[in-house]
Amino acid sequence: MTLQGLKEKLMRSVLKDPENTIRAAYALRPELAGTPYYEAPMLGCAAADDPLFAQFKADPNIYGSALRLPEEWLPDAKCVISVFLPFAEEVRRSNTPDLEEPSDQWLHGRIEGQAFLEEICRRIAGWLEAEGYQAVIPAIHEDFCIRRDPARKELGQPVFASNWSERHAAFAAGLGTFGLSKHIITEKGVCGRFGSVITDAPLEVTPRPYTEPYEYCTFCGACIRRCPVNAIFPEGKDVELCSDYVDDTCRRHAPRFGCGKCQLAVPCTTRIPARLRRKTSDD
């Protein structure tokens, strides 16, 4: 299995699967049936022993000790595969105008779309295992956990700490850098979902076309203005306030939930902000 071969299988698996659409059996409205969740995927690969993972774990200002290293998930790990599935235009467009409530399409994308992403990760693991390799999906592993520790807020650290981070894996795998809203800005923007697979397959490592954690962010503040509860500000993000709001959407839309407003109608929704082109036009 080569990285390019994996990308090609992933592309076909995402774009040609009828499960990558809202199904009539559970559509919140009949007319939503057939709406796609995702567009063409992205895939990157980091070396399991990349020093970045140890740096993430060692520095509480980056992530902290809760993080498991790749080899703690799979002792013979060689690679960390990161997958980004960008939300389809219909999902993005539906959730843009109303800053108070998630659209029905977004609610489906956040729940059934997430289930489809997890299935895609299972397929990647299955393709690797069919060739004799081992594969672990941290986010659906029995040992995956998320801790909520309000005391961490007083230390200037994230209130939530899980033992694996899809965003940090994506950064290490060359898919993108962080933005002010703490989402990862990829070549296809921030609007989508991430998954990952750890394997002992010796895949080609994706070069990182950046060196700084916020290299793709222009700090324009557009995501600040889009947040329904003012959880994003120039100095950081109140993750607890954000989470409380999403929890509230679950009370209103149970069993579904979601927000995503800060990912929409911003310069990084579907691309890397055109910093260089902007500078040229200002000359």
Image (cartoon, rainbow, N blue to C red):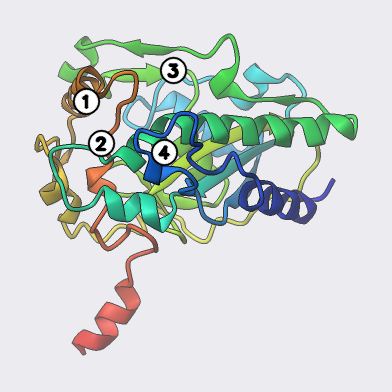
Marks 3/1: CA–CA distance: 31 Å
Q: Residues within 10 Å of mark 3 (few under 14, many from 20)?
A: some
Relative to 38, residue 123 above or below: above
Quadrant including the C terminus = bottom left
Q: Quadrant of residue 147?
A: top left
| Residue matched to label 1 | 249
Is residue 190 something that shows in the picture?
Answer: no
Q: Name the residue under label 3.
A: 65
Q: Earlier in the sequence, mark 3 or mark 4?
A: 3
Q: Nearer the viewer, mark 3 or mark 2?
A: 2
Residue 179, x across and y down, in percent: 31, 49
What label does residue 109 carry, if any? 4
Q: Reading the chain from its start, which is encountered first: label 3 or label 1?
A: 3
Percent x, y of residue 36? 49, 49
Mark 1, secondary structure of its residue: helix
Whether residue 140 is visible: yes
Q: Which amino acid does label 1 sit on?
A: Thr
Residue at position x 44%, y 17% in the image: 65
- Could you tell me how far apart the alpha carbons at marks 2 and 1 are, in whole angstroms? 8 Å
Of all residues, the one furthest to the right in this rendering is 132
- Residue depth check, mark 3 versus mark 4: number of the one nearer the observer: 4
- Could you tell me residue 225's position as x and y percent? 11, 50
Q: Which residue is drawn at 50% across and 49% down?
A: 38
Q: Are marks 3 and 4 in contact (CB under 8 Å)?
A: no
Q: Distance between the residues labelled 3 and 2?
A: 29 Å
Q: Give the Cα distance between marks 3 and 4.
A: 31 Å
Label 2 sits on residue? 259
Q: Label 2's element?
A: loop
